[in-house]
Amino acid sequence: MGFLTVLFGYGQSKQNGKLSQRPITKPVENIIATTAQLERRARSEKFCRSKNIPVYKNPKSLFVETDDKVTIRTKDEVVDRALALLYIGLKSEDAPQIYLDKLEKDFDISTKFTPQEKTYATTKKPTPQQQADANWRYEGLHVLLWALGYIDKLSYPDQMCNVAKDVKIIYDLKEQKFRQHAKLRSKKEILDQADLILRLNWACVNARTKNEPAPAKLNSEVVYESHYTLNWLINYLKQDWDSVTTDT
């Protein structure tokens, strides 16, 4: 019980730090969109307008790929990624090493780290910025739990996820059952969400360039992390986790 009490106690005061500065990127112009892309964009923009969120005006830019050109990450890839982010998030909150070691033993997490994550996981004294960046990965974990069917719906991104609930989902099942019970969402569901978050992140970045707050109470850090994770899920530009870009 001691381990569970400590483990599920994390996340209640998380994410006070800011993410490191992200570059502002420019989307590819003059795309000849398919009907599917136009329909997906229309649905996303309808949602944005319902929340008074600005929409991107150029009709020939800012699209996610169509279903036939996207290969979604496999269920096992998503499960492995979720387990790695769980560890990274807990380390960012200075969880005692004895608990992190138990997590590693129970879930064999070290084999799932990217090179950057392995460096962070083995660093004894991370910088405050490294801690903040790692802490925000909980939001990516939340998106992955949704993609695996453990969370019914992604909420409007105006506030941070409930880390304790997300951690409990994984730890209650252990790795084998967590993997077996996972049901990866359809390509359509994931692409719909990727298109929407693309537009929400554009609205946040657009506001940042004007030194304005994010519109409609969006939490720009939550939006960014969600965009990052969804881009990884849809294999955006075939980038690995450490190299994902969130072009807007």
Image (cartoon, rainbow, N blue to C red):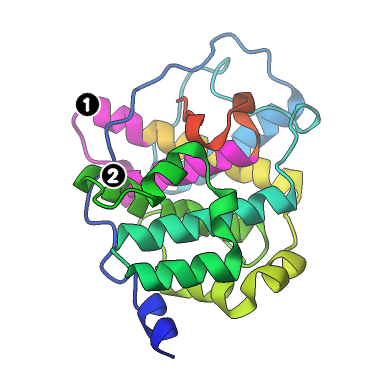
Quarter of image, res 188: top right
Quarter of image, res 33: top right
**Residue 225 on image: x %, y %:** 43, 45
Give, as a three-letter code, the residue at label 1: Lys
**Residue 52 on image: x %, y %:** 38, 43
Give, as a three-letter code, the residue at label 2: Gln
Residue 131 left/right relative to 42: left
At mark 2, the secondary structure is helix
Which quarter of the rendering shows the N terminus?
bottom left
**Residue 221 on image: x %, y %:** 34, 45
Identify the residue shown where x is 74% and y is 22%: 34
* Residue 210: assigned label: 1
Residue 162 makes an appearance in the image? no
Identify the residue shown where x is 49% and y is 54%: 85
* Residue 130: assigned label: 2
Q: Is residue 78 above or below residue 171?
A: above
**Mark earlier in primary sequence (2, 1):** 2
* Residues in magenta, as a range: 204-233
Residue 37 makes an appearance in the image? yes
Q: Characterize the local packing of mark 2: few (<14), some (14-19) or many (20 or more) Cα atoms within 10 angstroms.
A: some
* Residue 139: assigned label: none
